[in-house]
Image (cartoon, rainbow, N blue to C red):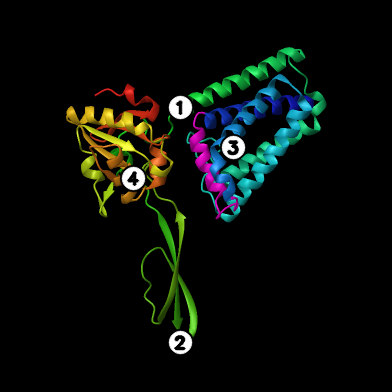
């Protein structure tokens, strides 16, 4: 039992630290995932949505600290009981998501490792098994150092987490795992390679044949049946290739200009997924850098999911010398974790991407 507890201690501790650090690298992204869980269609807790960012930061810091506490043996009983409570909650959450197909990605490892709801549930069941080993073998968890040293390690971990969270919130994630990272080409990210697997669907056709309802299953072809068509149900039996970027558009008046704009040699995108939630002070600095970019031959566009009246007000208020295009809010949240933010592209390749606090760092 002592050996099993030791293995579980290392496995659970390291996994919690890694999982927490990945999410702490991008707390804004994790907060979007929590908002999805809190929404009316999932847990029906919309009153938590405005606090999703604060909750996300607290949750991931606690996750990391519990991993550290387990490894160094600081307050073993508190640590193991907390781990057990946390994993029971998340096992329920991932089961709910899997069973009712509510959230397609749990966000357990941020954008670094995408897990399906079923994979997330299995992962939590495995973790629950190892944490139960720790629970029943609690007496075998001994501190690695004396009490003051272990407490000092935990406090240092807490300080490091707070400083790291403060940095990424005021700039951008240190490591970008999304398909819009610097150096990525958006056009290439939207393309489907030749020979990529195509989706396969089963079609369940219902016909009324001589007063009797009969079902015919095909994989696309309309069945040759001497009867009256009733209905058809479609089931995806094999997923096809989905490009990393599949929901990116740059629209104006119902027309998508993405393909032409992504061919521009010099393009600056000012992205604000929701202008109602933007940091308005940032538009003063954005006005300065975009004017500089325009003077150097760059085409500058704004991209937002806000309506035209709102974007026109912002353009007028800050005397911006560019207009806004419409892009889906979820897509813009994926592009950059800042509202607003600025990207510099060359023929669709992202050359620079900055938080609104860092627009002065842009080079044209």
Horizontal arrangement in the rendering, residue 356 relative to residue 159 (left or right): left
Check residue 309 for magenta coloring: no
Horizontal arrangement in the rendering, residue 135 relative to residue 29 (left or right): right
Tell me the number on the disc at residue 55. 3
Q: Look at the numbered disc 4 and give the secondary structure of its residue.
A: loop
Placement of the N terminus among the 4 image quadrants: top right
From the image, tell me which residue sits under label 4. 248
Q: Is residue 195 visible?
A: no
Q: Quadrant of residue 273?
A: top left
Where is residue 259 drawn, in percent x and y?
23, 44
From the image, tell me which residue sits under label 1. 170
Where is residue 340 drawn, in percent x and y?
38, 36
Q: How many neighbours does mark 4 have within 10 angstroms: few (below 14), some (14-19), or many (20 or more)?
A: some
From the image, tell me which residue sits under label 2. 210
Distance between mark 2 and mark 3 Cα atoms: 61 Å
Point out the tag, 4 or 3, that comes first from the N-terminus. 3
Report the mark closest to the observer, 2 or 1. Answer: 1
Distance between mark 2 and mark 1 Cα atoms: 70 Å
* Labels 2 & 3 near each other (Cβ < 8 A): no
């Amino acid at each position: 039992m002592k050996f099993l507890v030791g293995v579980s201690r290392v496995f659970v501790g390291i996994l919690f630290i890694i999982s927490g650090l990945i999410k702490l690298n991008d707390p804004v992204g994790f907060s979007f995932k929590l908002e999805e869980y809190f929404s009316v269609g999932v847990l029906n807790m919309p009153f938590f949505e405005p606090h999703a960012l604060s909750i996300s930061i607290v949750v991931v810091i606690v996750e990391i600290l519990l991993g550290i506490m387990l490894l160094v043996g600081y307050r073993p009983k508190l640590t193991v009981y907390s781990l057990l409570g946390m994993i029971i909650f998340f096992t329920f959450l991932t089961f709910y998501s899997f069973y009712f197909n509510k959230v397609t990605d749990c966000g357990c490892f941020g954008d670094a490792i995408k897990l399906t709801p079923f994979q997330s549930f299995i992962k939590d069941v495995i973790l629950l098994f190892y944490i139960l080993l720790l629970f029943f073998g609690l007496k075998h968890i001994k501190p690695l150092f004396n009490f003051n040293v272990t407490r000092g390690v935990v406090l240092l971990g807490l300080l490091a987490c707070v400083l790291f969270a403060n940095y990424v919130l005021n700039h951008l994630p240190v490591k970008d795992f999304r398909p819009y990272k610097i150096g990525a080409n958006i056009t290439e990210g939207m393309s489907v390679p030749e020979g990529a697997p195509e989706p396969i669907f089963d079609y369940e056709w219902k016909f009324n044949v001589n007063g009797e309802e009969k079902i015919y299953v095909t994989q696309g072809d309309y069945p040759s049946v001497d009867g009256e068509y009733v209905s058809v149900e479609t089931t995806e039996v094999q997923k096809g290739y989905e490009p990393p970027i599949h929901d990116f558009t740059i629209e104006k008046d119902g027309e998508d200009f993405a393909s032409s704009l992504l061919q521009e040699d010099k393009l600056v995108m000012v992205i604000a997924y929701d202008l109602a939630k933007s940091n308005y002070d940032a538009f003063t600095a954005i006005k300065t850098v975009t004017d500089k970019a325009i003077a150097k031959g760059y085409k500058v566009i704004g991209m937002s999911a806000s309506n035209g009246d709102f974007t026109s007000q912002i353009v007028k208020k800050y005397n911006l010398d560019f207009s806004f295009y419409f892009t889906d809010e979820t897509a813009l949240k994926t592009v950059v974790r800042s509202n607003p933010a600025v990207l510099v592209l060359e023929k669709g390749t992202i050359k620079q991407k900055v938080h609104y606090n860092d627009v002065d760092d842009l080079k044209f």
